Image (spheres, rainbow, N blue to C red):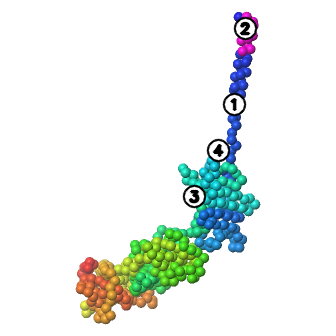
């Protein structure tokens, strides 16, 4: 190979090396990238919002900060009517205004995004002097989010649906639909201390009274029913049926309105909803430390189609609500049917009259001393007495309310419970002839229930067996 050819090959190799190096150099250079655009338009705290003004088809709303009293106000909406959870979410989303995505370039005409005639316009001013203005357009078809455009920015963004929809409502959308407080504990029996129902559909007002936390008079009344948690007071006095009590009292709490019909209403405007002629009024007091002891009065007026106008004391707002369960509360459904069942620890004895005989029964159990029972002064077996007492306190009605006759005649049986507590009057049960094989029972002067006649026969038999030391039959 000649020297000339060798020089040509070397020159060609060098050229290839230079070209390869240039190629590698160009390959290693960063390709030009589109400048990243931030989706965060504001990164502030809610309390840095000085004013939020929203305009939309519903009339919009304005949120402003006022110093006296300190806090935010929404137009003329009373603060106690605001849905605080929804309001706080709105303020948080506006203070940290953030888009979800940026629509890729090139953009279509603004009318394709609904931004030529936006659904809402929002203007934010902040305590640091900053301001933001933006528009909300149509829904993005796939995600359900809304198109957004900032004033002074040609880009189009998508904005989360939940935050956007809060800007498409009027001021009424920020008013809470919660008419009565939510149940905050495990049972309505623990949440509500007392409740009273009245209205034209009730023969008598119904009063449900909590024993725990009640006054001395309530606790004394409760001795009639042993370990009762609540009493029902109507024509008579009874222990509350727990199952129906939970249903009725539970329906007082967490009532949600179908919608808010009006607020800041004058008295004549309230009367337009016939609230001065209520179908029912429910007054109840919450238990617990958060309660100020003031009863909540909920008034219902018929609005037709199983709905009611509702008004809560202390608020000048009217709600439309569905028929609550307590509206159908009936005295006879709320009461236990036992006439009296005091605990042995609370009584000193009892007197039974019937069949031409009188039985004065005493009972005592002091400290570590054995229990003692006697009939007409003669000691009796305590185990027999316990069976006898279970029979006496099993006296209960098994039917509905009755209408007592004006002159019932003479009682055929009397039971009087004597209490240890000073000043606690006896409970007196009188049994009168009623319908066939039934006896009307008058408890402390009130007759509203009856009982099978077989109870009287079994009880008088038991009185004799107790004295004779014979077995007591408890089934009647």
Q: Are marks 1 and 4 in contact (CB under 8 Å)?
A: no
Q: Earlier in the sequence, mark 1 or mark 3?
A: 1
Q: Is residue 98 magenta?
A: no
The reply, left or right, for residue 126 in relation to residue 313 is right
Can residue 19 be seen in the rendering of this structure? yes
- The part of the image, by quadrant, that contains residue 343 is bottom left
Check disc 2 and report its element: helix, strand or loop: helix
Q: Are marks 2 and 1 in contact (CB under 8 Å)?
A: no
Alpha carbon distance from label 2 to label 1: 35 Å
Q: Earlier in the sequence, mark 4 or mark 2?
A: 2
**Which mark lies nearer to you, 1 or 3?**
3
Q: Earlier in the sequence, mark 2 or mark 3?
A: 2
Question: Mark 2 packing: few (<14 Cα in 10 Å), some, or many (20+)?
Answer: few
**Which mark lies nearer to you, 2 or 1?**
2
Residue 313, given in percent of the width and then of the height, sits at 55, 79
Check disc 1 and report its element: helix, strand or loop: helix
Residue 285, given in percent of the width and then of the height, sits at 52, 78
The region drawn magenta spans 2-12
Residue ID at (70%, 58%): 132
Numbered badge on residue 162: 3
Alpha carbon distance from label 1 to label 4: 29 Å
Residue ID at (40%, 85%): 203
The reply, left or right, for residue 122 in relation to residue 161 is right
- Mark 1 lies on residue: 28
Q: How many marks?
A: 4
- Mark 2 lies on residue: 5
- Mark 4 lies on residue: 106
Q: Are marks 2 and 3 in contact (CB under 8 Å)?
A: no
User: Observer-nearest residue: 191 or 198?
Assistant: 198
């Amino acid at each position: 190979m000649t020297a000339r050819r060798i020089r040509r090959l070397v020159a060609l190799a060098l050229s290839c090396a230079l070209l390869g190096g240039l190629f590698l150099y160009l390959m290693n250079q960063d390709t030009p990238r589109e400048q990243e655009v931030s989706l965060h338009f504001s990164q502030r705290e809610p309390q840095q919002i000085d004013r939020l003004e929203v305009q939309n088809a519903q009339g919009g709303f304005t949120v402003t900060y006022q110093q006296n009293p300190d806090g935010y106000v929404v137009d003329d909406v009373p603060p106690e009517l605001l849905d605080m959870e929804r309001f706080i979410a709105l303020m948080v989303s506006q203070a940290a205004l953030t888009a979800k995505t940026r629509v890729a370039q090139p953009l279509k005409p603004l009318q394709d995004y609904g931004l030529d005639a936006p659904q809402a316009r929002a203007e934010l001013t902040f305590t640091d002097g900053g301001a933001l203005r933006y528009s909300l357009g149509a829904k993005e078809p796939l995600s359900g989010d809304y198109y957004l455009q900032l004033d002074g920015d040609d880009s189009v963004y998508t904005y989360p649906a939940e935050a956007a929809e809060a800007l498409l409502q009027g001021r009424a959308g920020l008013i809470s639909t919660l008419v009565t407080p939510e149940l905050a504990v495990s049972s309505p029996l623990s949440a509500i201390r007392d409740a009273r129902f009245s209205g034209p559909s009730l023969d008598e007002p119904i009063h449900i009274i909590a024993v725990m936390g009640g006054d001395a008079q309530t606790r004394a009344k409760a001795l009639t029913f042993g370990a009762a948690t609540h009493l029902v007071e109507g024509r008579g006095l009874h222990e509350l049926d727990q199952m129906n009590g939970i249903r009725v009292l539970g329906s007082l709490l967490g009532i949600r309105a179908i919608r808010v019909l009006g607020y800041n209403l004058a008295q004549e405007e309230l009367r337009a909803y016939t609230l001065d002629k209520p179908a029912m009024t429910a007054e109840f007091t919450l238990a617990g430390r958060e309660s100020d002891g003031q009863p909540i009065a909920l008034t219902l007026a018929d609005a037709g189609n199983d709905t009611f106008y509702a008004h809560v004391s202390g608020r000048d707002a009217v709600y439309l609500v569905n028929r609550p369960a307590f509206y159908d509360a009936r005295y006879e459904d709320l009461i236990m049917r036992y006439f009296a069942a005091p605990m042995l620890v609370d009584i000193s004895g009892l007197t039974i009259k019937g069949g031409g005989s009188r039985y004065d029964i005493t009972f005592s159990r002091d400290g570590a001393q054995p229990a003692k029972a006697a009939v007409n002064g003669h000691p009796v077996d305590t185990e027999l007495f316990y069976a006898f007492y279970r029979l006496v306190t099993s006296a209960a009605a098994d039917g509905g309310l009755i209408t007592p006759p004006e002159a019932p005649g003479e009682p055929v049986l009397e039971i009087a419970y004597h209490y240890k507590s000073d000043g606690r009057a006896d409970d007196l049960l009188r049994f009168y002839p009623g319908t066939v094989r039934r006896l009307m029972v008058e408890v402390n002067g009130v007759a509203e229930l009856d009982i099978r006649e077989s109870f009287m026969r079994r009880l008088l038999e038991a009185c004799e067996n107790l004295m004779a030391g014979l077995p007591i039959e408890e089934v009647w």
